[in-house]
Image: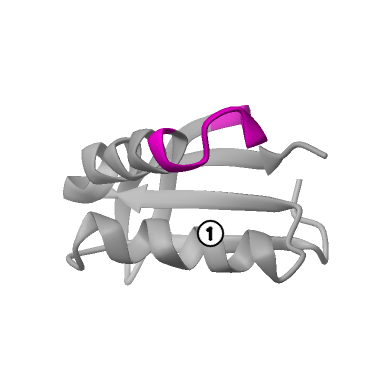
Amino acid sequence: MYTPNTKVIDIGKRPIEDYVFEAVISFQEGVDEIILKGRGDFISRAVDVYWALKDRLGDSIELSNIEIGSERVRGRMRSYIAIHVKRKY
């Protein structure tokens, strides 16, 4: 569920640590849930970002949901994964 206090991070070609840093900063700014979204070839990279974030933050975050599916991007159907990560209080 996308709420006003949710941030979607689209995973692409940048280094994994860049996405981890972006997620950590978002949690520090008060975001309650982050969605790591990887499409096509970047699905495995989204999973790698989650595990790197879990290594960094440990028990202060929890995996709340994983969505898989397809969506139309620029006229083509693309597979995606959306990993929902919540911060614990």
Percent x, y for residue 13?
Answer: 17, 65
Along the line of sight, which residue is nearer the eye, 44 or 31? 31
Residues rendered magenta in the picture? 55-66
Q: Which residue is mark 1?
A: 24
State the SS at label 1: helix
Left or right of residue 87, residue 53 in this image = left
Seen at 65% across and 36% down, the residue is 60
Seen at 82% across and 66% down, the residue is 4
Seen at 61% across and 66% down, the residue is 26
How is this picture coloured?
one colour
Along the line of sight, which residue is nearer the eye, 68 or 74? 68
Q: Is residue 44 above or below residue 8?
A: above
Count of numbered badges drawn on the protein: 1
Along the line of sight, which residue is nearer the eye, 60 or 37? 60
Q: Work out which quarter of the rendered image holds the C terminus and state it.
A: top right
Q: Within the image, what quadrant is residue 59 found in?
A: top right
Left or right of residue 44, residue 83 in this image = right
Percent x, y for residue 75?
Answer: 32, 67
Seen at 69% across and 40% down, the residue is 86
Q: Within the image, what quadrant is residue 46 found in?
A: top left
Asked whether residue 59 is drawn in magenta, I would say: yes
What amino acid is at disc 1? Answer: Val
Q: Is residue 83 above or below residue 5?
A: above
Q: Within the image, what quadrant is residue 43 found in?
A: top left
Q: Residues within 10 Å of mark 1 (few under 14, many from 20)?
A: some
